[in-house]
Amino acid sequence: MENWESYVRKVVPYVPGEQPDEKRMIKLNTNENPYPPAPGVLRALRESDADRLRLYPEPDCGTLVRAIADYYGLDASCVFAGVGSDDVLAMIFLTFFRSEKPVLFPDITYSFYDVWADMLRVPYEVRALDADFKIRKEDYCGECGGVIFPNPNAPTGILMELADIEDIVSRNRDVIVVVDEAYIDFGGVSALPLIRKYENLLVVQTFSKSRSLAGMRIGYAMGAPKLIRYLNDVKYSFNSYTLSQPALALGVEAIRDKAYFRETTEKIIAVREWAKGELKKLGFSFGDSMSNFIFVKHRSVPAEDIFEALKKEHIYVRHFSGERIRNYLRITVGTREEMETLTVFLRGYLESRERIVGEKEKEL
Ligand SMILES: *Cc1c(COP(=O)(O)O)cnc(C)c1O
């Protein structure tokens, strides 16, 4: 090894879901929204003035931060914006997870947490979900260097009760508790009201899922002004111009359109509930997802086989290799038409698979 190589920060990177670029595909693998962004976003995009791109964007993301604060009825000092919630979460790890004690998160969860922890040399411990893939709140109430979990959890989709979250926050007053609410708009109850009561709580959300702007990269954290100040200090020490001018302008339009937001999230919830019924009939089991994806396991056909068969049909879903979850598939909720194409294909495929297995069993 060359000498310089021994000084490299060696990391095992996060592996994002595939972004295939096929004309005719059904993309249900990275939890994007199947509906376009709000009409105001499209208008602002069309009317944008390219000459202004000569100038740096607002370093404090002020217009967007104020629009987010207005939407939630908060003071702007309670909001921090970043380049997707991944950026916000990375800044949170960098700013607040500095204890020698381990940060706690579930064994089955967003697979970026351990990547940030390893990269930043943050000690951590994972706590196993119970047999039904639920977070056990008791596991997060001992001494630790911080707590982070998504609610609803990913990739399980399972929601934790607000009272249980409050328990975790109130029993960890010496450290920061982060609730990653990437999927909260699909039927969950946000922990946001708790930020007035607990100075150690950060609630993180994103425009990528419920606001159809994954490609624009906008995320934000909400918490006590003191927490937001610390986050901004680290951000300005890292990269002051984070969100681009277009991202700031389009984000404002997206958060202002409450009617469109309600309409599209309600549609996704309705399609999800319909899809749950269909998948159950096809022999899948799953926890009660409150997100825009369903984490399913089939009674007889291995997840990997289903994954490959779907891929041949240009239908993309997500398969993870973790030990406890390798027989599961995470299926993003698409449009009703997309989900119908999916279930029609699965019906034919699974019936023929189960028939072959049945015949082999008879032969034996
Ligand atoms: C999608 C996702 C994020 C990150 O989303 P951004 O696109 O970076 O805003 C964060 N946490 C969880 C649990 C997610 O699923």
Image: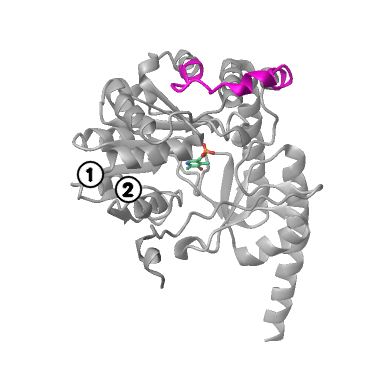
Residue 160 seen: no
Q: Of tags 1 and 2, which is closer to the observer?
A: 1
User: Quick one: label 1 or label 2, which is nearer the N terminus?
Assistant: 2
Residue 339 is one of the magenta-drawn residues: no
The local crowd at label 2, few if under 14, some if 14 to 19, many if 20 or more residues have their Cα within 10 Å, is some
**How far across and how far down the image is residue 250, in percent?**
61, 22
Residue 245 seen: yes
Identify which residue, 204 or 194, lies in the foreground. Answer: 204
- What is the spatial separation of the Cα atoms under label 1 and label 2, in whole angstroms? 10 Å
Name the residue tied to disc 1: 141
66 vs 237, left or right, is right
Residue 53 is one of the magenta-drawn residues: yes
Q: What's drawn in magenta, residue-wise? A: 42-65
**How far across and how far down the image is residue 227, in percent?**
29, 27
Position of 135 relative to 50 (above/below): below
Q: In the rendered image, which quarter contains the C terminus?
A: bottom right
Location of residue 203 (image quadrant): top left
Identify residue type, mark 1: Cys
> Please, which residue is most extreme toward the front here?
3
The local crowd at label 1, few if under 14, some if 14 to 19, many if 20 or more residues have their Cα within 10 Å, is some
Q: CB of residue at label 2: within 8 Å of ligand 1?
A: no
Residue at figure coordinates x 23%, y 45% from the top left: 145
Residue at figure coordinates x 72%, y 37% from the top left: 335
Position of 216 relative to 8 (above/below): above
Position of 223 relative to 297 (above/below): above
Identify residue type, mark 2: Arg
Identify which residue, 31 or 357, lies in the foreground. Answer: 31
Residue at figure coordinates x 66%, y 61% from the top left: 307
Name the residue tied to disc 2: 136
Q: In the rendered image, which quarter contains the N terminus?
A: bottom left
Q: CB of residue at label 1: within 8 Å of ligand 1?
A: no
